Every structure is written in C-alpha cells, then in structure tokens.
C-alpha cells in the first residue's frame, strides 16, 4: 500500500503524498521530540523534513527504503533545527510514567528527571543514535544508512552516549548491572 502511494507521489500526486505524510506524522514527531527534547522544535523539524521529502522524492531510487530515507531527512532536519536554536530544555512535566509501574512514583520521577537532564547534555549526533537504536529498534547498519555514517561509528557514538548517561546519573561502568536498553529505555 505505502509503496503504491510513494510511487504515485513520485509522479507528482499531492493526494498520495498527503496520505503518506498523514500516516507518518505522529511517528516522525515522536522521533524528533525524543531527539530535540522540545515540542516546538520537533514540529518545525518534522515540517522541514516533510518539505524535503516532497522536494526530493523523485530522487528516491528504492521505494521499499522510503521509511529509512525519510528518517534520514528527519534526522538531518533535527540537526539543522538544533544548530539553529541551540536550546536545551527538559520537559519534566511531559515525562510519562509507565502504566502499572509499582515503584515509588517520587523515586521514579526523580530518576527520570536525572536521566532526562543527562540525555539533554548529549550532542545531537549521540541523541540521534540512541533514539534510532533504542526507541525505534534499528540495527547499527540501518542507523548508519539513515545517518550516512559507518556502522562502526554508530557503535562508537552509542558507546560514548551510554557511558555519558551512566556517568551523569552517577553509575560507573564497573557498577552498572543494567543493560543499556534498560537504562536508556527509561527516557520517555
């Protein structure tokens, strides 16, 4: 279904592109929001990515790679947005507590606030790698393709990002018994 819409949009069908954009908007916003940590900046980045997607859609060679290609445009728009604003905001009020979480709510909010602040201190490149691997579940090869970097660089950025997060929340690499996915998974 999406392949047919992409094919039609490539030939200039605005209605097909509107359908694609409508279907992908929420997911794109979620990615941008997690990378930029700012709702308004995320909206701007998504709009810019959609404009770039429409403008460059004819250059897409493999229609089956549309999602990865459009995510690459989104991450680039996030990077441009970040460079343009240089804002760091933590929106503690928007942190979602998991349903059914039996831990002490005050301790949970405190831990997530600390993790949120640590995440905000990461560079945009490191945040993008963490979001793409841990939130979206992309492999290192896919993240490398999206960001236009080698898979080894993805692993390196992920390593340094997780180490910085652990350091910022007071864990040492030696004391850490939680897996990186568990630790990073608390950022929501």
Image (cartoon, rainbow, N blue to C red):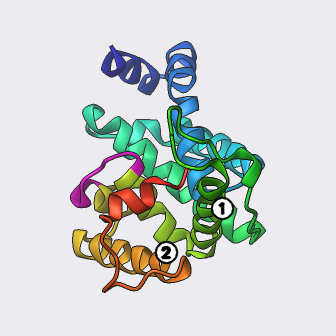
Say what secondary structure mark 1 lies in: helix
Residues packed near mark 2 inside 10 Å, few (<14), some (14 to 19) or many (20 plus) = many
- The residue that label 1 is drawn on is 110
Instruction: Give the distance between the C-alpha atoms of the residues marked 2 and 1, in whole angstroms.
Output: 15 Å
Q: Quadrant of residue 26?
A: top right
Query: 140 left or right of 161?
Result: left
Q: In the image shown, does 32 or 4 lie closer to the viewer?
A: 32
Spot occupied by residue 56 in the image (x, y as percentages of width and height): 49, 42
Q: Are marks 2 and 1 in contact (CB under 8 Å)?
A: no
Q: At 68% across and 60% down in the image, what residue appears?
A: 81
Residues packed near mark 1 inside 10 Å, few (<14), some (14 to 19) or many (20 plus) = few
Which residues lie in the magenta part? Answer: 135-142
Is 147 situated above or below 97? below
Q: In the image shown, does 76 or 8 lie closer to the viewer?
A: 76
How many marks the image carries: the answer is 2
Spot occupied by residue 82 in the image (x, y as percentages of width and height): 67, 66
Q: At 39% across and 24% down in the image, what residue appears?
A: 6
Q: In the image shown, does 29 or 162 lie closer to the viewer?
A: 162
Query: 160 left or right of 101?
Result: left
Say what secondary structure mark 2 lies in: helix
Q: Quadrant of residue 86?
A: bottom right
- The residue that label 2 is drawn on is 165
Let me know if residue 59 is in the magenta part.
Answer: no
Give the mark, 2 or 1, whose residue is nearer the N terminus.
1
Spot occupied by residue 109 in the image (x, y as percentages of width and height): 65, 54
Query: 152 left or right of 58?
Result: left
Q: In the image shown, does 32 or 67 lie closer to the viewer?
A: 32
């Amino acid at each position: 279904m999406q392949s047919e819409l992409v094919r039609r949009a490539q030939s200039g069908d605005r209605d097909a592109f509107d359908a694609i954009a409508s279907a992908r908007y929420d997911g794109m916003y979620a990615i941008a929001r997690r990378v930029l940590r700012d709702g308004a900046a995320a909206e701007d980045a998504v709009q810019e990515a959609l404009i770039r997607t429409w403008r460059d859609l004819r250059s897409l060679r493999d229609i089956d790679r549309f999602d990865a290609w459009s995510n690459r445009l989104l991450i680039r728009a996030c990077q441009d947005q970040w460079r343009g604003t240089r804002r760091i905001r933590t929106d503690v009020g928007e942190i979602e507590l998991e349903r059914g979480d039996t831990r002490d709510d005050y301790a949970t909010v405190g831990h997530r606030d600390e993790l949120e602040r640590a995440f905000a201190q990461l560079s945009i490149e490191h945040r993008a790698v963490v979001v793409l691997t841990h939130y979206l579940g992309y492999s290192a090869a896919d993240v490398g393709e999206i960001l236009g970097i080698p898979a080894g660089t993805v692993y390196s950025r992920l390593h340094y990002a997780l180490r910085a997060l652990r350091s910022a929340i007071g864990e040492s690499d030696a004391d850490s018994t939680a897996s990186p996915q568990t630790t990073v998974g608390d950022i929501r």
